Image (cartoon, rainbow, N blue to C red):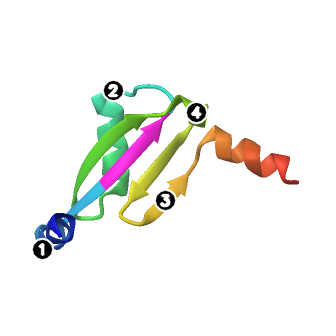
Amino acid sequence: MISAFQTLLDEKRGVIRAEITTAVDINDQDIRTIADGIANKSRVDVKGTVDASILGGMIVRIGHDVVDMSLKRQLDLLAKV
């Protein structure tokens, strides 16, 4: 219930919430650069997380949308060929 309210409030305020997962910790400037790339006249609230299992690259989640640019995913795709 609270997350549904937060989603509606974010939409009203023009806020996009994103989560960036990387294999190593990245600095605030890198997070801001990625957020600026996501923004389209919206404020982007970004949460960064570290997951070494993705090996490299990043995974960006915005709502239900996921852009997986991780090295692990690329290797998994190559293994299926």
Above/below status of 35 relative to 48: below
* Disc 4/disc 1 C-alpha distance (Å): 36 Å
* Disc 1/disc 2 C-alpha distance (Å): 29 Å
Pointer 3: residues within 10 angstroms few (<14), some, or many (20+)? Answer: few
Above/below status of 57 relative to 4: above
Which mark is in front, 3 or 2?
3
- Sequence-first tag of 3 and 2: 2
Q: Quadrant of the N terminus?
A: bottom left
Disc marking residue 22: none
Outermost residue on the right side: it is 81
Q: Give the residue drawn at x 52%, y 56%.
A: 67
- Magenta residues? 18-22
Tell me the residue that label 3 is attached to: 66
Residue type at numbered disc 1: Lys
Q: Give the residue drawn at x 49%, y 33%.
A: 51
- Locate residue 52 relative to residue 78 in the image: left or right: left
Residue 5 on the magenta span: no
Magenta stretch secondary structure, dominant? strand
* Disc 4/disc 2 C-alpha distance (Å): 19 Å
Residue type at numbered disc 3: Val
Which mark is in front, 4 or 2?
4
Q: Secondary structure at mark 1?
A: helix
Pointer 1: residues within 10 angstroms few (<14), some, or many (20+)? Answer: few
Residue type at numbered disc 4: Ser
Tell me the residue that label 1 is attached to: 12
Percent from the top left, x then y, of residue 22?
47, 35
Q: Secondary structure at mark 2?
A: loop
Q: Quadrant of the C terminus?
A: bottom right
Q: How many numbered discs, if any?
A: 4
Disc marking residue 27: 2
Q: Kindly check if marks 3 and 4 are in contact, taking CB atoms under 8 A apart as contact.
A: no
Tell me the residue that label 4 is attached to: 53
